[in-house]
Amino acid sequence: MTSPSAAPALPVTGTPVLEARSLVKHFPVHRRGRRTQRGAVVHAVEDVSIAVPEASITAVVGESGCGKSTLTRMLARLIRPTSGELLLNGSPAARQDAREYAGQVQMVLQDPFASLNLVHTVRYHLARPLRIHGLGPDARSMDDEITSLLERVALSPQTADKYPHELSGGQRQRVAIARALAVRPRVLLADEPVSMLDVSIRLGVLNLLGDLRERERLALVYVTHDIASARYLGDTIAVMYAGQIIEQGPAATVTDQPSHPYTQLLLAAAPDPDRPSPAALRGRGAPPSLVSPPAGCRFHPRCPFAMAICAEQAPPGVKVAPGHVSACWLHAKDTDPGTPQKPSTPQNPGPGPGSIPPTTASQQDSRPPRGEST
Amino acid sequence: MTLLHVGTLDQPAEAGRPRPDEPLLEVTGLCVDYGIGPDAVHAVLDADLVLHRGEVLGLAGESGSGKSTFAYAATRLLRAPGVITGGSARLHLGQGRDIDLLAADEAQLRRLRWAHVAVVLQSAMHALNPVMSIGDQLGDVLQAHRPDMNRAARRDRAVQLLDMVGITADRLRSYPHELSGGMRQRVMIAMALALEPQLVIMDEPTTALDVVTQREILEELAALRDRLGFAVLFITHDLSLLIEIADSIAIMYGGRIVERARATALFRAPRHPYTLGLLGSFPSLHGPRVHMTGIAGSPPDLRNPPAGCPFHPRCGYVMERCRTELPPLRPVVRAGVADPRVAACWLQDGSAPPPAELARPEPDPGPGPYLSPGPGPGPGAGGTPAGTEGGTP
């Protein structure tokens, strides 16, 4: 891999391998007692559409409870959406049976200490999906297949006969990735794949995912709470808040010129030793209850720029630049695409994201180069 | 003491400035084993550290590097099978009183703990008692250590303490499960500060929290430190966070402290290859997206540590000497250049010029990290231009 930004900034050409259209997931609330509301639900994911093209990485960023894991589980068809449609290679996924779907879409879980079975060797973990999907007909081809899988995740063939406790965290996560690759999927869903690993080995696993995208043209969904790693690995970043995608666009653009106030807040709060002065947090507080989410924009109770309309109507997805969509009323009347909201150069991000209201920013800001630096 | 809501504080008091000439805790030669006999694992080896009054000292390292063990041993909170096998930890209480925590008896420790040294743990859900309201838990501390306070005074103090961390008094009767993760951690901080300790040990206090909550709590902590003047030993694996909030940082690897420096100096000009590798493990939020490599290999197995320098199997600059001889933590020697730094690395012993990336010039002291604001705006006020409030078009 030469650079994580080697892929095109906007690889949304042709049919996406996996596409979700207006996915909704409501979990019913079962509460006892007098205050039971009939039909109360947790609005975990609300009207989320996402397209994952071949050989690209879509990073889904959000805080805990924003619905990013629920979304991943729906994409993996582990839970059934309340409504919405899932398309695999352009055809509705609902028509395919579960095994056929799992042969195309695989998951890597957060905790490799829990996702591997302690009483089985690595060989067992890798042979099982091969056997279930009929990919290793005889013992010899099974062995070859396992060796090649281990090589693809940069592990030695001897690893096959080890038990999970003999491996380090990074090696375990590589085994989990190899297991997901065993069935030759086209989509890999990685839910916080490095957050349980030591910091010095996280990049190794992230780089492996980047390599797989390039070498095997895998479509990857990288779910994380860490916006810096999303910027590093992702081609596209989708930011989720309270069950909705509130901003989506090329990774470097979303982090360098965030257009949604929540994205600006996330960036201001993220650890950043390069920051010359502390960034002002604009929009303190906590995400809303998802049982009764606020009307209109779900961020409006915290939003420093909230207007009357924000409390009444949910904002539409507004195109702020090519491929960069922001669900915010601040941009709805702004017909000039490509208006950056955060006057910044990398070395001197000024007073921090969000301290200039977007409407004034458009008048005073020079337009930074669009897209990604390579 | 006046207790204001932290959000209303304007200029930070002088209380919270680090005072480099006044050591608060001096740890020398601390060694900790897990287990006894030939199979004992050496979790901390010959660690020296000085924490000054009012200073935020960050202790960074990966899991198993011994950072928590160090802090718990130095304060005698370590449980079996942890065994302190050597060293001293002198706590200077002021007015010439000082005490070696490692030699203190239980009665002395009982008086020191909480009153002088308090701890904030990572998992607030497990550290708080689930069947007691938070008001009762705060009252409990005061009842044990301040027997002269009556019930009403304890309640008033509990209200003050909660107010200090931005929690309203009506939460006194809440139980831990009724609070959010951020609020629970705030309660933990309020409890730690209940007796106005001089030293607060924070073991990954914000790791389980979301970034926005984490930032809010760190800002509050900064304001409280400025006002109350306690010193903090902040343990975390997140070096990028530490650089923002700590005055100085010690890096641990394989049970040893491998580098110690001011936070900005450590960030701008690391002297140990492990520090350099760790700094290169955090993707940046700015600038071109460049390929990063992290550090090859895995952290050492302490049951079977490598000979010589513990980092040598992963080090890109490894020399023959590193495989056999352990580099001591000592001042960096450079021909012709005064370098005020310490590092445990053979590259820095002056026998040959170190690689350029390990010999960057020492940055100007400048304004420190914002947890210790110098003259100028306090935390949270930094650089917000006037007239941008309420940016509703």
Image (spheres, coloured by chain):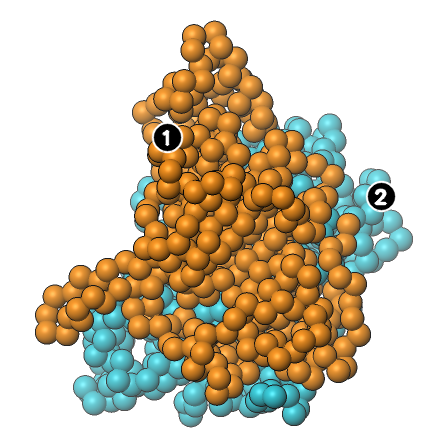
Residue pictured at 50% horizontal, 47% vertical:
A19
On the rendered image, what quadrant is the N terminus of chain A found in?
Answer: top right
Q: In the image, which lettered chain appears cyan?
A: B
- For label 2, the SS is loop
Q: Of the residues shown, which amino acid type is indicated by label 1?
A: Arg
Residue B249: percent from left, percent from top: 60, 59
Q: Can the viewer see residue B179?
A: yes
In the rendered picture, chain A carries what hue?
A: orange
Q: Residue furthest right?
A: B336
Q: How many marks?
A: 2
- A100 sits left or right of A238 in the view: left
Residue pictured at 72% horizontal, 33% vertical:
B318
Q: Nearer the viewer, residue A197 or B230?
A: A197
Q: Which chain does tag 2 point to?
A: B
With respect to residue B250, does B223 lie above or below? below
Q: Nearer the viewer, residue B18 or B105?
A: B18
Q: Can the viewer see residue A265?
A: no
With respect to residue B2, does B262 lie above or below? above
Is disc 1 on the same chain as disc 2?
Answer: no
- A178 sits left or right of A151 in the view: left
Location of mark 1 (residue): A99
Location of mark 2 (residue): B353
Please tell me the numbered disc located at residue A214. none
